Structure formats: structure tokens, C-alpha cells
Image (cartoon, rainbow, N blue to C red):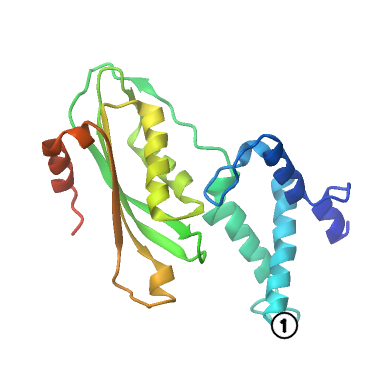
């Protein structure tokens, strides 16, 4: 099978175009931090991998890198395509993790904090890594759904596995956890290093960005908010 046949599924149209047309027909947004898994049909992710490989090879050619004779870069286009689609940006192309929810049978109503959860993302401006930690505070009520502690990490990984900016990522994660658990209050703090500052630009290795989202009682009750923030061992 020729490379062109791999890309166009036999009908002459690249698979990326087919996916994009479905998204537009459904009026579904497909920004860099949006999940589009429901619009990708079985087998198409592999075709998309072939297409991205070909495009990435074009980038390497335009950068005047002799991948045909340089043993270090001869497979780089494929490796980069796999990295983007299957690893660092998988949160765009795969469905969310299965999260089993249980009723709050014991009527728990005390502050619960999960973290630090290590998260890895990339800025949508330069595709440079964003690496940091997240703390999640939940104030449940008798109607709150209880999920396992590891599931918070799974949800964070899924949301962060997309090109985006930190401020929007934290809001997306808050929306998802709010939907899954329905607590009285939700608080999220994220602290991360941005390699678009450390690797390029000002090349400052020490700067970090910290931002938070407060919902429900965390927003209304200053004492609860202070308690949550005081219990986060950010200096550890």
C-alpha cells in the first residue's frame, strides 16, 4: 500500500479532513484543548498517525535536515507523530477514563484534599512542556458521588494531555470533577513550570505559575478557603 493510500482511506480525502468535516457538521469546537474522540471512527487514529508523520517529515525537510542519511533523525517524523497523538496530546483523541461513582453512604462532609498530583501538559503557543503539580480540595455532601483517589489523577491526566494554557486547563478540570462528584465545594490549585519561558524567551528556569479555581463553599467561606490553602504543602 502506498503512503498516499494510507492517508486517504482509499477515497482520496485525508482522514484529518473527514474528521474536521464531522466536527463542523456537528458544530463542535475543535480547539487545541478540546477532546474530539467521539468524532474519530475505528481505525482512523492510525490513519491520522500516518498523515501527521508525512506532515512532520515535511517540517524536517523544510528545516533542511537530511533524514535520509542522518541515522539520528531518519525515524524522527514517526516518533514525533506517535508522541503527539498517543502520548502528550492523547487527551484530545481518546475518550475520558472510566470513573466509577459511589453514593456517599457514610454522609461524609469533611474537607478532603488530594495531591500533589504530577501533571504534564504543553502550552498551545509553542508546544513546549508545562510540568507541575495539582492539589484538589473537595467538600462533599450527602448527595456527593464518591470516586477513588486514583481517579482524580486519571481525570487530571486526561485534561492536561492537550495543548493549552494553564488557566483554561484548571477550569476544564474543575468542570469535569464538579460534574462527576457534585460536591458542596471544589478547590483546585496548580503550580507549574513553563518551558516556553525556561527553554526559550527569557530562559528563566525558576519561574512558576500558580493559579486556582474555587467553587461553592470554597468561594463563599474565607475560613474554609484558608484551611485548604494552609494544608497544601507546596514547599515540600
Residue named by callout 1:
66
Please report the residue visible at 21 percent of the width from the left and 55 percent of the height from the top.
234
* Image location (x, y in percent) of residue 155: 43, 40
Count of numbered circles on the image: 1
Per the image, label 1 sits on a secondary structure element best described as loop
Left/right placement of residue 221 relative to residue 150 reads left
Position of residue 89 relative to residue 205, above or below, is: above
Work out which quarter of the rendered image holds the N terminus and state it.
bottom right
Q: Nearer the viewer, residue 213 or 114?
A: 213
Relative to residue 181, is residue 76 drawn left or right?
right
Residue 40 in view of the camera: no
Whether residue 39 sits left or right of residue 209 in the image: it is right
Residue drawn 70% across the image and 45% down it: 20
Q: Residue at left 40%, top 36%? A: 175
Viewer-side residue, 24 vs 194? 24
Against 217, residue 6 (above or below) is below
| Position of residue 14 in the picture relative to residue 129 (left or right) | right
Residue 192 can be seen in this image:
yes
x, y percent for residue 55:
72, 65
Q: Is 168 or 40 nearer to us in this picture?
A: 168
Residue 8: x and y in percent read 83, 51
Which quadrant of the figure contains the C terminus?
bottom left
Q: From what the image shows, is residue 154 above or below residue 145?
A: below
Q: Badge 1: few (under 14), some or many (20 or more) residues near its Cα, within 10 Å? A: few
Furthest-left residue in this view: 223
| Residue 95 image-quadrant placement | top right
Amino acid at each position: 500500500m502506498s503512503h498516499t493510500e494510507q492517508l486517504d482511506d482509499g477515497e482520496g480525502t485525508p482522514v484529518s479532513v473527514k474528521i474536521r468535516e464531522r466536527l463542523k457538521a456537528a458544530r463542535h469546537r475543535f480547539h487545541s484543548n478540546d477532546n474530539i474522540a467521539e468524532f474519530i471512527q475505528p481505525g482512523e487514529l492510525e490513519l491520522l498517525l500516518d498523515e501527521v508523520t508525512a506532515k512532520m517529515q515535511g517540517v524536517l525537510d523544510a528545516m533542511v535536515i537530511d533524514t535520509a542519511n542522518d541515522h539520528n533523525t531518519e525515524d524522527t517524523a514517526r516518533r514525533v507523530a506517535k508522541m503527539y497523538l498517543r502520548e502528550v496530546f492523547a487527551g484530545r483523541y481518546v475518550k475520558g477514563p472510566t470513573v466509577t461513582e459511589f453514593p456517599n453512604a457514610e454522609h461524609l462532609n469533611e474537607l478532603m484534599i488530594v495531591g500533589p498530583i504530577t501533571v504534564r501538559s504543553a502550552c498551545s503557543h509553542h508546544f513546549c512542556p508545562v510540568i507541575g503539580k495539582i492539589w484538589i480540595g473537595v467538600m462533599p455532601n450527602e448527595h456527593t458521588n464518591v470516586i477513588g483517589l486514583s481517579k482524580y489523577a486519571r481525570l487530571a491526566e486526561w485534561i492536561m494531555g492537550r495543548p493549552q494554557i494553564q488557566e483554561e486547563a484548571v477550569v476544564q478540570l474543575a468542570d469535569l470533577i464538579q460534574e462527576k462528584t457534585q460536591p458542596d465545594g471544589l478547590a483546585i490549585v496548580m503550580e507549574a513550570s513553563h518551558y516556553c519561558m525556561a527553554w526559550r524567551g527569557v530562559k528563566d528556569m525558576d519561574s512558576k505559575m500558580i493559579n486556582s479555581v474555587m467553587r461553592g463553599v470554597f468561594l463563599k467561606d474565607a475560613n474554609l478557603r484558608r484551611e485548604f490553602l494552609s494544608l497544601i504543602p507546596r514547599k515540600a
